[in-house]
Image (cartoon, rainbow, N blue to C red):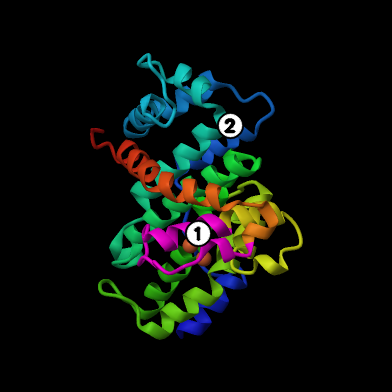
Amino acid sequence: MSPAAAIQNILDGGGDLPVLPEMAGRILEEIRSPDASAARLAEFVKKDPVLASSVLRVANSALYGGRIEITDLAYAMTRIGLNQVRNLVMATLLRSRMADPEVYGPRGPMLMDHCLAVAFGAQLVADATGQPTDEAFLCGLLHDFGKLALVKALREARGLRQGELPEEDLALVDVHHPAAGGMLAEEWGLPEIVALVTRQHHRLEHAQEAQAMTAVVAFADGMAHRLGLGVAPKDDLDLAAHPAVAIIRLPQATIDDLLENLPGLCEIAGAALKGTPQG
Ligand SMILES: [Fe+2]
Ligand SMILES: [Fe+2]
C-alpha cells in the first residue's frame, strides 16, 4: 500500500488504529457509569501495581499540595477527583505503552512528551480562563495523537522497523493528524469534546463549536512550541499575537505567568508519572 493510500485507509475507517490499553478502557467505562465510585475504581487500578503507585505518587506530589501522605488508593481518588484519575490513568498508560520506537519511530517518545506538556499546559490555561480543567487536560493530551496513529500506519505500509519516515510521509502526517486524532478519540469512546477539539486545533479561526476549549488547547500547544516541550523551541513565537488570545482573553501578565509555570509543572508531573524521585 502506498503511503497516501495508507492514510486514506485510516481516514476512511479501514485502518488499524492504535488500541486503547485495556485498563484505560475499563476505567473510562467505570467513570462514564452513573454510579461511578472511587472504591470500585480503586479496585481496578490496584490490579496494575505500576499504575496504582503512579496514582498515589501523583496524589502525594506537589501538584495537589497535600501535606499528609496518602497511602490508600480510594482516598487518593477522592482527593484528586474521579475525572482527574481518569486523566492520570490515560497519561500513565499511554506514556508507558505507546512510545515504542519500533511502532512509532524515534520521535515517538518526544511526541508523547509534547502531548503531556500540552495536557498540563491546557489545564493551566483553562484554570486561568475559567474553562473546565479536567476536559482541557484530556483534550490537550490527545491533540496530536493522530500523529501516532498515522505514523504507525505509515511505518507498517513501508515495513519500517527502525529509523525515521521520509520527509514526504512526515508532511502527510502534519496535514492529516487532526482528522486521524478525531477518529481515534471517537474510537476510544472519549468525551465528544475531545474529538471536536482535536479536529479543530490547527484551524481555530474556523472552529464552529467548542471554540473556547479549542483556543485553550491551541494556546497550550503554542506555549509548548515556544518553550520547546517535546518539540524544537521557537524562541521568537509571539504568543500575545496568538489567535486564541482574542477568544479566551489572556492579558500579557497571565501569558508571562503561564510561560513561567509550565516547565516546572511538566517536570513535577513527568517525574511523578515516570516514577523518578522528586527532589
Ligand atoms: Fe497538531
Ligand atoms: Fe501539538
Apparent side of residue 116 relative to residue 250 in the rendered image (left or right): left
The residue at the point 65 percent across, 51 percent down is: 213
What amino acid type should be assigned to the residue bearing mark 2?
A: Glu
- The range drawn in magenta is 218-243
- Give how far across and how far down residue 92 sits, in percent: 39, 42
Compared with 207, 95 (above or below) is above
Instruction: Indicate yes or no whether the magenta region holds residue 152.
Output: no
Compared with 45, 214 (above or below) is below
Judging depth in this view, the residue of 139 and 265 nearest the camera is 265
Judging depth in this view, the residue of 159 and 59 nearest the camera is 59
Judging depth in this view, the residue of 89 and 260 nearest the camera is 260
Q: Quadrant of the C terminus?
A: top left
Regarding residue 150, the answer to whether it shows in the image is yes
Mark 1 residue crowding within 10 angstroms, few (<14) / some (14–19) / many (20+): many
The residue at the point 37 percent across, 74 percent down is: 155
Apparent side of residue 226 relative to residue 178 in the rendered image (left or right): left
Q: Which picture quadrant has residue 34?
A: top right
Residue underneath mark 2: 30
The residue at the point 62 percent across, 72 percent down is: 12
- Give how far across and how far down residue 151 sits, in percent: 42, 70
